[in-house]
Amino acid sequence: KTSRERPLIIKDILDYLEGKEMWPAQCLQDFDFFLRAMEVAGLLNSSKIAYRIHNLALTENNINLLGNLRKSERYYEIFMMLLLRTEDLETTLKMYNKLAPHTLSPRKDFFNNLLMEINSKSAVHHLGKIFDDIELCSHGGASKEEMYEMNTVVLACMNGHPPSTSQFTNLSQTYVDIAQRIFKHLEVNKASAGLYLRFNTHAAKICSLAIQVLLREAQFESACNILAFCNEEKERMPGQLSEASLTSLMDAAVEAENVDVGIQIIDYLVGMNSEQARPCGLQLASLPLQSSEKNTLNKLLAFDQNWVNI
């Protein structure tokens, strides 16, 4: 056959083998069959052929022919990446939920592609299960830096798709849980030799996004804990909190009449030479401040020629 026709031999083979038991193996090469077949399905970009191969693998005891752990993992990886490319997201996740995390331990590339699909399709109701699997599978074998990058993507996805805009209920609790876990991961691993905090270029963005997600779900105290961490580690942590996260936190602090947090925010804004320092100062000044608090606020904003002492 010509090279163009040769890949379609797989259809003839499947027609012949469909419904038959192939176990026990007759030779060592038999343990390569399913992986090789799935590789061909991947090259053909055919989910139809992939499903036929997988159904054959599930026939009788044929699953034993997947081979060793490395071959088995590769088989499922190709299968799921193919479905992610060619099937709609809900169909892909239906198969994913059957396999992960017990049969399939997804690798980082699959998780990254899956998160991109979830974000583009606004399918955030799946994030709870997916993030559980990400943690259970150690982020798919990702490096420390890749772990933080993946966590940033998860937070950005949640920040871009608030629960209030979703048709699904009970997302708020899931968002809070994930945001708190991601921040805790950063906090616990700040001294990890794999990536010290002073080299972690994702840390500031993780904290900024976590603050925004938590504030949107009325988790003021949790957001304040992140600010306290950033203040404590600001000499070591690369980058700075975003102005958007700080101004959102100021809104919440004023609403809660928490002057101490408000002063911390202004101190942070002044330290980063932000133009938002004075507007936030005016917000805080709207509260009934004590004399010492007024003095502190005036000192912090003394550099601003447009600031009028209160």
Image: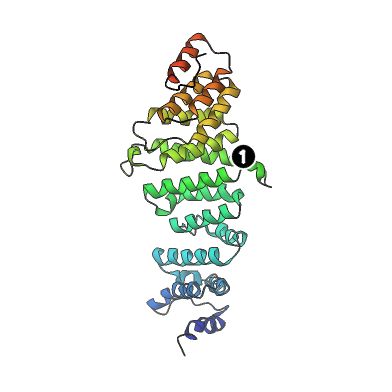
Instruction: Indicate whether 217 appears above or below 84.
Output: above
Q: Position of residue 236 (x, y in %)?
A: 34, 34
Residue farthest to the bottom? 1
Q: Nearer the viewer, residue 78 or 261?
A: 261
Q: Position of residue 262 (x, y in %)?
A: 51, 22
Residue 212: quarter of image: top right
Q: Nearer the viewer, residue 152 or 20?
A: 152
Instruction: Indicate whether 120 appears above or below 212.
Output: below
Residue drawn at x 55%, y 24% is 253
Query: Which amino acid type is shown beneath numbered disc 1?
Result: Ser
Residue drawn at x 54%, y 80% is 14
Q: Position of residue 187 (x, y in %)?
A: 41, 35
Residue farthest to the left? 193
Please state if 16 lies on the left or on the right of 168 as rendered: left
Asked which secondary structure carries label 1, the reply is helix
Please state if 165 lies on the left or on the right of 75 as rendered: right
Residue drawn at x 53%, y 51% is 130
Q: Is residue 170 visible?
A: no
Instruction: Indicate whether 248 appears above or below 64.
Output: above
Q: Position of residue 141 (x, y in %)?
A: 40, 53
Circle 1 residue: 172
Mark 1 is surrounded, within 10 Å at the Cα level, by few (under 14), some (14 to 19) or many (20 or more) other residues, namely: some
